[in-house]
Amino acid sequence: MRFDIVGGGAIGLLYGARLALAGHPITIWTRTVEQAEKLADDGIELVREGTITIADVEAFPLKNCSRSARQIDDPDRVVLVAVKQTQLTDALIKQITLLAGQDTIVIGLQNGIGHAEKLYEALPHADVMTAVTTEGALRHGPRTVEHTGTGLIAIGEAIANEGRKSASNGEPIERMKPSEQEIRHKMLLDAFSKAGITAELSNEMNNRIFQKLLVNAVINPLTALFDVRNGELPKQARRAALMRALYEETHQVLAAAGMHGDEDRWQQVLQVCERTAGNISSMLADVQAGRQTEIDWINGSICRIAAQYGLEAPLNASMVQLVRAMNNTVH
Ligand code: PAF
């Protein structure tokens, strides 16, 4: 399979490197011309136990994003959308539509809530899927990514195909047969597993998205506010108490919205802190770089869901206000 990876962040580079090492042609579409040039000239540098350079990388800036009709209709193409929610603007989605033809698999990998609806709406002809990854990755520069913790990627539909029967002009959409789609999804899993990425298909994506949202709603704002790496967050008693209170509130909201499963979710949050102990969370990285954060899609989503279910979410609302205030020039 051929992969177009939209976004040269930590996850985009990690998956790009692993898929390229397994022999899949990849193209990375970056936000800056500088990063595309660097990747095309010097390749991706993947740090795990040692450092491997993947030299043969095709990379272009997103603003030049296009594919020929022949490439677009290649049934074995996958578009992996690995940008943050903040970057998934209407303009970027328009560029993604230039990469995705009839039945192209398009996978949205964002944290939080909001991306699935946007992608499904903009790409009614594509095979839009969402994914949740628990992989730990840290970008050290425009072409260097460190694989800091092994996780898995769960991929599936967050909105059933039946709910998307017509294009924006009201015309019914001719879709691939479910049996053909199933074969392609198996090929996709195969491509990931041959690349050393543990992948599974899930028909419970909304639940998975909620579970990841719970992790992000606790770890991301608190690491940003306290300016600590993930592993340090639970180590101090008062921080851990706040973490637990934010967890309880968020859990209650998501459980009301349908999050289910037997796993001990609090332990899972602690395990993510441990497994990604050396990581700077994506929200702390955004705050440090003075970039807009995903707070509105993470804790902001919890507040919106709480309102729908008649619940209060004062801690989540405070997180939104505090993180926004920390870099209020960019919101
Ligand atoms: O957003 C992030 O940084 C990651 O999703 C997580 C799981 C919090 C690890 O850093």
Image: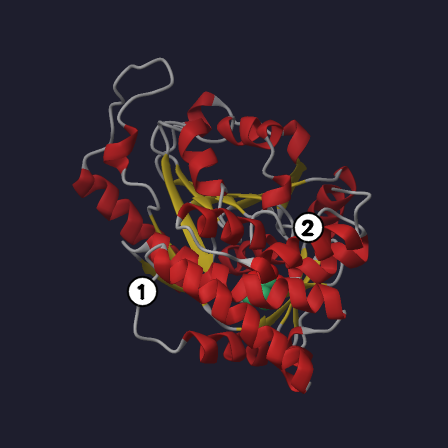
Give the residue displayed 50% in from the left and 66% down from the top: 249
Across and down, in percent, residue 129 comes to: 38, 44
Q: Position of residue 324 (x, y in %)?
A: 73, 50
- Residue drawn where x is 33% and y is 46% of the image: 157
Q: CA distance from mark 2 to mark 1?
A: 28 Å
Q: Which residue is mark 1?
A: 260
Q: Is residue 255 left or right of residue 321?
A: left
Q: Which mark is residue 330?
A: none
SS state under label 1: loop
Q: Seen in the image, is 248 located left or right of residue 137?
A: left
**Residue corresponding to mark 2:** 293
Disc 2 or 1, which lies upstream in sequence?
1
Q: Nearer the viewer, mark 2 or mark 1?
A: 1
Relative image position of residue 245 (x, y in whole percent): 55, 73
Is residue 276 something that shows in the picture?
Answer: no
For the residue marked with disc 1, what is the amino acid?
His
Residue 85 in picture, x, y percent from top left = 58, 45
